[in-house]
Amino acid sequence: MQHVLLTGGAGYIGSHAAAALLQAGYSITILDNLHNSSRSVRPAIEALGGRPVDWIEADIRDESALDRLLAQTPVDAVIHFAGLKAVGESVAHPLRYYDNNVSGTLTLCQAMARAGIQTLIFSSSATVYDLGQKMPLREESALGPSHPYGWSKFMVEQILLDLYRSDPTWRIALLRYFNPVGAHPSGRIGERPNGIPNNLMPHICEVARGRLPYLTVHGNDYPTRDGTGIRDYLHVMDLVEGHLAALRYLTTSAAPLVLNLGTGQGTSVLEMVNVFSEVTNRSVPVRVGPRRPGDQAACWADPGRARTLINWQARYDTAAMCRDAWCWASREETG
Ligand code: NAD
Ligand code: WQD
């Protein structure tokens, strides 16, 4: 059985990956500093996965904690979810983002090298691209982040590609996520950040729960079919399947894997609101506000390379994304 270390595995995407890896027969260790998560997710992961997990509350920047862990646990691969991901916060506190996301990854890779572990899957982001270019985005599209968060992902990609070029025995995957949304269909795990993120789906759910009076639509004068922003929303369960497929690929192929993980479909803000209301029968009043600084009109993926190389494509539609997001959010209400 392969043993996989999930850094940031208590977080939104990591917790869903943890459950899926356990169900797929892997054993796992979760290392997380709980900066944006809670240990309360552990029993749900173990219940869904049907097995206990090793659980380490530590920071990826803690070299001695990593050395102790990798000396005592036979890790075969690392999926590196740990990172700060709030764009606005990265603009206000760039050093915090470069220290956590870039220096943290350097410390992790150095500890892996000392322990002879050379298989790494990295959570990258569509924000490494120049989002002002023609859509859809392919892996060879022009790169050009527009904020420190995106630059931190860009820098880590470069570091990992240089690491491979220096020693081709490393097995590396850079997975560029578009807009992950939704929750586990069981309703037992979902996105539960410390504080409300700025993202669309959590805000829609807060309005549907009656905790916000209306959704502010950030601009309706974009050059899109209904004037609102278009994004490539991806069910978190599809995203997780992409990680399992990438892990399998790395056991048989040497070249670094650089992949877009998106559906290839764009959905506007108003379209997502309408699907949500239809699926959940909850009203989501909207008010149009000014454009959000830094937002682009449209961003969606061409996921063709993932289909070709790892036989992966998204299966869940926006109705399932809304259904599962609401199942989690409404259940959270009942605690
Ligand atoms: P999340 O905040 O829910 O999970 C990240 C986890 O990492 C959290 O549990 C946090 O406590 C932990 N963490 C952060 N810094 C750490 C450190 N120094 N040491 C140990 N643990 C640390 O975020 P998520 O949505 O699950 O995202 C996971 C990864 O995917 C992140 O790297 C993020 O940048 C990337 N990503 C997310 C999205 C998205 O929209 N959710 C899109 C593209 C990329
Ligand atoms: C989506 C659309 C908004 C909230 C961000 C990060 C990116 C990645 C995914 C980490 C846009 C509109 C939103 C609201 C709205 N995260 N919106 N009202 O900005 O595409 O990507 O999350 O890697 O790095 O940038 O996602 O969900 O914030 O916005 O109208 O209350 O919804 O303007 O068009 P975004 P988002």
Image (cartoon, rainbow, N blue to C red):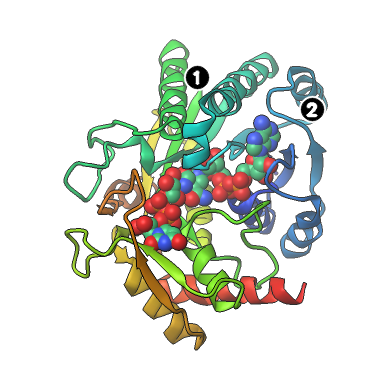
The correct choice, above or below, for 4 with respect to 297 in the image is above
**Residue 328 percent across, percent down from the top left:** 63, 71
257 and 289: which is toward the camera: 289
Task: Choose mark 1 or mark 2, whichever is in front.
Answer: 2
Indicate which disc residue 69 carries.
Answer: 2
- At horizontal 44% and vertical 79% (from top left) the residue drawn is 285
19 and 169: which is toward the camera: 19
Is 91 left, or right, of 117 in this rendering?
Answer: left
- At horizontal 31% and vertical 66% (from top left) the residue drawn is 267
Q: CA distance from mark 1 to mark 2?
A: 22 Å
Asked if residue 325 shows in the view, the reply is no
Indicate which disc residue 169 carries.
Answer: 1
Is 313 left, or right, of 83 in this rendering?
Answer: left
Quarter placement of the N terminus:
top right
Quarter placement of the C terminus:
bottom right
68 and 168: which is toward the camera: 68
* Residue type at tag 1: Thr
Q: Secondary structure at mark 2?
A: helix
Is 333 left, or right, of 284 in this rendering?
Answer: right
Asked if residue 88 shows in the view, the reply is yes
Q: Quadrant of ligand 1?
A: top right
- Some atom of ligand 1 lies within 8 Å of the CB belonging to the residue at label 2: no
Q: Secondary structure at mark 1?
A: loop
